Image (spheres, rainbow, N blue to C red):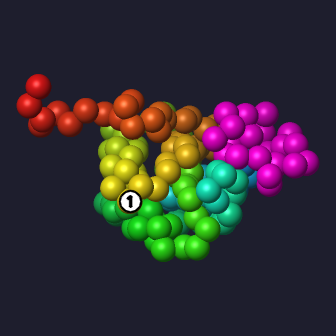
Amino acid sequence: MTFEDLPKDWPSRPLDDPIVGPDVVDLCVSYKDRLDGGLSVLFCRADATLAQPVFIGDFELGDDLALAAERMIEIGTSLPGVGGLVMSVVREVGCPTDEDRRVHQRALEVCASYDMRLVAFNVVTASGITPLAVAPELSLADPNAAA
């Protein structure tokens, strides 16, 4: 499916739905955003429905997406009615990279520290959407931790 196939009641559907969620991301992240690159954040209500989409673009090479993700999570904790978020690293092409995984891991950690639900995390390109796991038990292990 794509955003063109969204059901009429999509605003009342939770974004953790594996069919509707990616299609709403597809709707909220324009083709131009994908060409330019950036970070997409869909703030969600407690029931995981969309409250407000935000796109942060105009990143320069070397800008820290993980820090931007952390700041957006912090902002979300202060917004009334926000109970979670969907976060996506956005770029023109490619599959998930180590940098994407670093941003993903940081989002998992910061969300856990604020008790904010990370509803979904994606890598969005001009050719599609690749979800990354959001269950804390599936997050990357700290390679520096003692076994």
Asked if residue 25 lies left or right of residue 141, the reply is right
In front: 66, or 128? 66
Q: Tell me the amino acid under the disc marked 1.
A: Tyr
The majority secondary structure of the magenta stretch comes to loop
Magenta stretch holds residue 7: yes
Which contiguous range is marked in magenta?
Answer: 1-21
- Asked if the magenta segment contains residue 50, the reply would be no
Q: Position of residue 104 (x, y in %)?
A: 40, 45
- Camera-side residue: 115 or 135? 115
**Image point (70%, 46%), residue name:** 14
Residue 2 image offset from top left, x and y in percent: 78, 39
- How many numbered dots are placed on residues in this image? 1
Residue 4 location, quadrant: top right
**View extreme (right): residue:** 8
Image quadrant where one finds the N terminus: top right
Q: Quadrant of the C terminus?
A: top left
Taking the view exactly as shown, the residue that stands out farthest to the left is 146
Residue 67 falls left or right of residue 134:
left
Task: Tell me the residue at 41%/67% (across/down).
Answer: 74
Q: Residues within 10 Å of mark 1 (few under 14, many from 20)?
A: few
User: From where the camera sits, is residue 22 visible?
Assistant: no
Look at the picture and state if 130 lies above or below 10.
Answer: above
* Residue 50 shows in the view: yes
Residue 13 percent coordinates (x, y): 77, 47
| Residue to which mark 1 is pinned | 114
For the point 69% across and 57% down, the residue is 50
